[in-house]
Amino acid sequence: MAAQVSILFPIFEGDEKSVEYKALSAVAMHDLGIDMLCKAMSKTEKEEKLFESVFKAMSNDPRVASYRSDVFEDVLNNPQMREEMSQLLEHVQVIKDFGILKRDVGAKAGLWELLHKLDEINDYIHSVESIYNCLDKADIKSAGLIALKAYVSEIYKDSYFEELKKDINNIKMDTSEVQSVTIGINLNNRFEAESIGLVSVNNKQFKTSTILQNFSSAKGIKDTTEWKGDMHYKPIEKDSVNVAGKIEKLGGFMAMNSTAFVTSDVRKSIVNIPDDDSNSDVPKYLDQVASKMLNLLVKKLKEVLVKYVGLSIGNITNLIPEFAYYIRGAELIEKLQKRGFTFCKAEAVDGPECFMDAHGVYNMKLALEGGVASFDDVVTNDLDFNNDNLAYILTGANRGGKTTITQAIGQLFVMAQSGLYVTGTGLKYKPVDNIFTHFPADEDKTMDLGRLGEECTRFKEMYGEATSDSLMLLNETFSTTSFEEGYYIAVDAIKAILNKNIRTIYNTHMHKLGYNVEELNNSDYKGRAVSLVVKSSGDGKRSFKVEKMPPEGMSFAQDIAKKYGVTYEMLTKE
């Protein structure tokens, strides 16, 4: 049997070292809006957490990104396969939610546990058959799904699998005959339960009826213990069972201390057995009773299930969250595409140079938040990283879109490396090993060190972890102090970033950094810093377009002055 296949975390044959994954921090997830993406993709809280774990796993190996993006493209381009897989995986997920997958068929396993295990194997058979048929019909091209198809085909066509199907089918026919059990209770002269036992095992379920229909005499009491002439009662030993206590725990269906007969409404409540800690032993007790009376069936079940105790069911069921990730991602992208938003498949490359060439980029949050009426209202941008454009000093007018474009670049790398289509019309990039964000902290996090101290401490920690394969996104870093102090610290920070050759966007209101960008560059550095500006249109409105150019004057100060009416013209206007 071939090794287990993963469609998210590939193992490359012949590779001496395993792929390394680094964890994207929860802070970076929030700063980039990836938590919003997870919520938009998922249908349940469990799915949301699963998707977060995928996005957090960052690897700079371009083979991983390509492997994932090829699988995603197959899932996106095969809607019929996606629909069939979605239905199957929702069915199998129920089994995982009930936690049955890790149960063993031990010597003390009771009837109900064996039946659960039987259902698990039956669903495994159904899953293998469904995945095989689904992939066999689909037009798949990705290495991941092709490997999965070969893996499942090997299982499906194996004689062992055919034997398993026959055995499980035969035993299922036997166990399906058990539809209900009849329990008998003996009472003393105070109408208290004296003993309890299993009367019969039936192939039909009980139907609702009034209890008096079953009684013969005028007093409503039968003069015999016969039940259609075939009633077998096997009492359970008093020493091993607290009979009265067990009866009371059966959903409170018999108030034996106050009435001789139970009403039909109370009788119906037998199906509502509580499942809290105080009543957790009731199902086990019923299991004990049924197992004593069904020894032959239990024995047969164990014989079949022990035969397949080594069956690796997890190899198939572990694919559930992986398929769910691709399916939900494809559903979201497809929905946004129908609204006119552009997405493309990213191309991961390798090489010594820090690299990115992105076209038509926009922030995913614009599509998810519904802040724009249509894609026609979205402003897109082109941006690249290379040795000539390694660290961008991004300036521009207040609320001009600096944070929006900074977030968008981080989103590109997270989505691309996780396999999803990305916003825009084209992306070619070298994957990063991690993304470090330095956005303004919440006020309660700066109480001890002060804002500037907190910023410096956080930047030092980030810089220590970052490598030449990382991406660093700085948003108004070192702006909580005076301009002179902030500028002094920022200059050293950027020089250190260039020295380490880290792809960076530094979004700042310190326009002087952009003016003096050449003073930051040093011939010893591989990469260079460059000024990037969010341009203003001729009429003073925001254009949200970025361009490599010197800063457009002190636009931020002008904006603030106009906002609060302190320009010369506004102050002297009569």
Image (tube, rainbow, N blue to C red):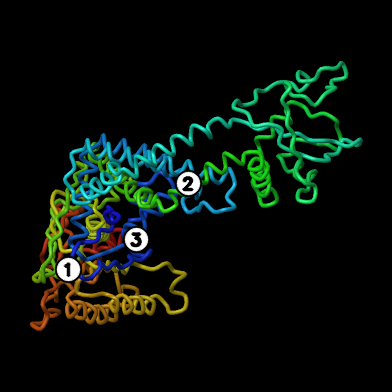
**Label 1: which residue?**
392
**Could you say where residue 408 lies in the image, as x and y percent from the top left?**
24, 57
**Label 3: which residue?**
29
Of the pair 407 and 422, the residue shown nearer to us: 422
Which residue occupies the extreme bottom position in the image? 524
**Could you say where residue 213 lies in the image, as x and y percent from the top left?**
76, 18
- Determine if residue 400 is in view: no
Q: Label 3 vs label 2: CA separation?
A: 45 Å
Q: Amino acid at mark 1?
A: Tyr
Which residue is depicted at the point 80% across and 40% down? Answer: 195
Q: Label 1 vs label 2: CA separation?
A: 63 Å
Which residue is depicted at the point 71% across and 39% down? Answer: 251
The label on residue 305 is 2
Of the pair 561 and 512, the residue shown nearer to us: 512
**Label 1 secondary element:** strand
Q: Is residue 353 above or below residue 339?
A: below
Which residue occupies the extreme right position in the image? 189
Q: Label 3 vs label 1: CA separation?
A: 22 Å
The label on residue 285 is none
Name the quarter where the C terminus is drawn: bottom left
**Could you say where residue 334 lies in the image, as x and y percent from the top left?**
25, 40
**Label 2 secondary element:** helix
User: Left or right: where does residue 459 sit relative to residue 515?
Assistant: right
Which residue is depicted at the point 34% across and 46% down? Answer: 324
Image quadrant where residue 520 sits: bottom left
